[in-house]
Image (cartoon, grey):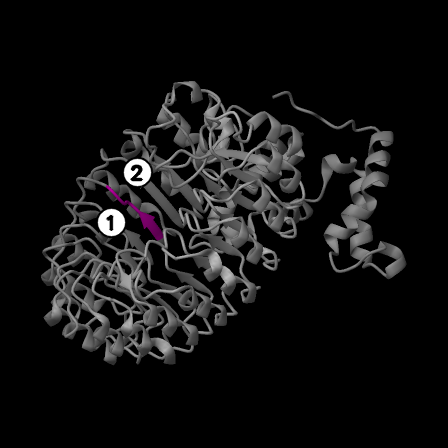
Amino acid sequence: MKRVRPHDGASSSQSAGEGGRSKVLKAANPGTSGAVEDGASAQAVAEEVAVVSIGGWGHLPHHLMDMVKEKMKDTGELMTRHSFNAELSRSVKWMLKNCRLVNQHWCKWATAATHALHPTLLGLDIASGMAMITGRFKSVTALILELDPRIGSVLGYLENLPNLTYLYLSHDSITDAELGALGKTNNLRDLNLRTYQHIRGEWLEKLMALSRLEVGYCPEFGDEGLAFLSAMSFLEVLDISSTAISDVGLRSLELVTTLRELDVGFCHEKVKGLGLKNLTFLTSLNAGCCSISDEGMVSLEGLSSLLTLVLCGCKHVTDVGLRSLSFLKSITILSLASCDKITDESLAIVGTLDALQRLCLQNCGLIRGKGLRYLDKLHALTNLDLSGRHVVNGAGVMYLEGLTSLLSLDLSSTEMDEKEVTDEALVSLGSLWALTKLDLSYVWCSTDQCLRCLTALVALKTLSIHHCDWVSDYGLGFFAGLRALTFLDMRYCNDITDAGLVHLTGLKDLNELRIAGCQISNAALQWLVELASLKDLCIKPKKRANDIDVDACRAVLPNVKLAYYFEGCDDPMYEELVAGFYSGIDQDSDWGEWYEDDPEACDESDGPDFTGPDISDG
């Protein structure tokens, strides 16, 4: 890309200054308007004058550029576990990459403002590449290195990144000896080595300052590695899921009193819960798919600080073992998914956990519905998942009407007892007025009269009813009042036709609509064009003459991203990715997933990608 350098002449400076005067002041003082007229600070005015006098927009003060960068960040990413995800967002990468091509002033800022890197070094001399990275990008706090078998040989360069706090490494070839070089990274706090095949942990004695360690799915990491952790005085989060640890090794963690979150999921036969007994300082424990039995549940009774407990897939736990939950009154998140031996009676204990906010009972096949009556006193409960292998009776559904604090309810794939579940039973869900998310996909019902409950759920933002062949155009009439709805999935509701979509025209906030498998033709476009906020539309590839046509969609909805849905998929395949190989796909075959339109998920160039800068730039 050719560099664009602003002219240094006065005319250019004046033009840039006059054209952007109000914008600069607005960025410097976001709470004011009108600059001088409204009494803007003298400092802001002086900064604007300085911008104009030294070269206009080509020499913006760096702190203003920092403010622009902050505005470019994805607010959703800022809420994730790692705040640096926002530094790797598409918009920030675009900004940094292009700012380096303007002039030396902007390039200098972009280099200093690069705080997270995810470089591609394949095909390059890795030593030279790492030397360049560590020599130039001194502000980097987060680094991701993966898919390169040579990574281990250059870890010594990382000592030259004084601000590095997060490191993600991914390649099976790295050895314990090579990881020892990380001992020279003085500020490293967060290390992710998930899926390594041949590490045991000897190098951990050189990383005593770690606050977060993830070595999940490292099959050779076992009790010997845990022994090195006992001396860590700052460790707060530990992921040792699917490793070779046992209850014996877990006792090493009794000395790590700073530990708050522990993941031992998928450790299967060796973790039975006995080694967790004295970890009373934990606030979060994932012991899913371990061999925890009723005896092991007794060991958890002393963990009174627990806020989150995941026991999904613990197939040895019975109603007797769940009695131990009565000692854990602080729990706010509880997952008992796929605990095959628990029954409705176990919910009597769950119903005493007054602080509970999220409860997952997915695929608990012996819960038939009558136990749901015990949940009516959980006034803090906001999320309830009853999806999967259940056969729920009508009374069970009606017990839910008292859970008025629910924000999310998942009943998908629940097998309703056809003899007992009537339209009136599902209509009772209308009392859940606070719901923002409801999933009724694959749920059986006799008629679409049961959708009358939706008329009261005016706060709904997400609604899924896919593969409900009892829903017709008449049922869509109950959607008209859902003005807050942003996502609607109606795939393979076979009785929905063009005429039914007229009921959706009032949903002005609807962003994503999935109608693949419905009886929809081009005639429906007259209604779809009324959806002012529509950004994503999922349809089925045209097979019949009267199916909705992609070209017609593009013509009428030019700003809407189209996606194809193939039977057997769970997510859309967007047309941009389909275009190159669509003709070779058997449309009748089962596909396993949707594909997003994310061209930046792949390398954007033949050269290395350093989250903005190209290492060949000066």
| Residue 380: percent from left, percent from top | 42, 75
Q: For the residue marked with disc 1, what is the amino acid? A: Gly
- Name the residue at the right extreme: 37
Please tell me whether mark 1 or mark 2 is closer to you in this view: 1
Q: Mark 1 sits on what residue?
A: 216
The answer, for residue 436, to whether it is visible in the render is: no
Q: Is residue 191 magenta?
A: yes
Q: Residue 170 — which label?
A: 2
Quadrant of residue 394 within the rendered picture: bottom left
Choose between 223 and 276: the one closer to the eye.
276
Name the residue located 78 percent from the left edge and 51 percent from the top edge: 25
Q: Is residue 328 magenta?
A: no
- Please count the marks in the image: 2
Does residue 334 sit above or below 1 in this rendering? below
Q: For the residue marked with disc 2, what is the amino acid? A: Ser
Q: What is the magenta range?
A: 190-195
Name the residue located 48 percent from the left edge and 26 percent from the top edge: 544
| Residue 560: percent from left, percent from top | 60, 36
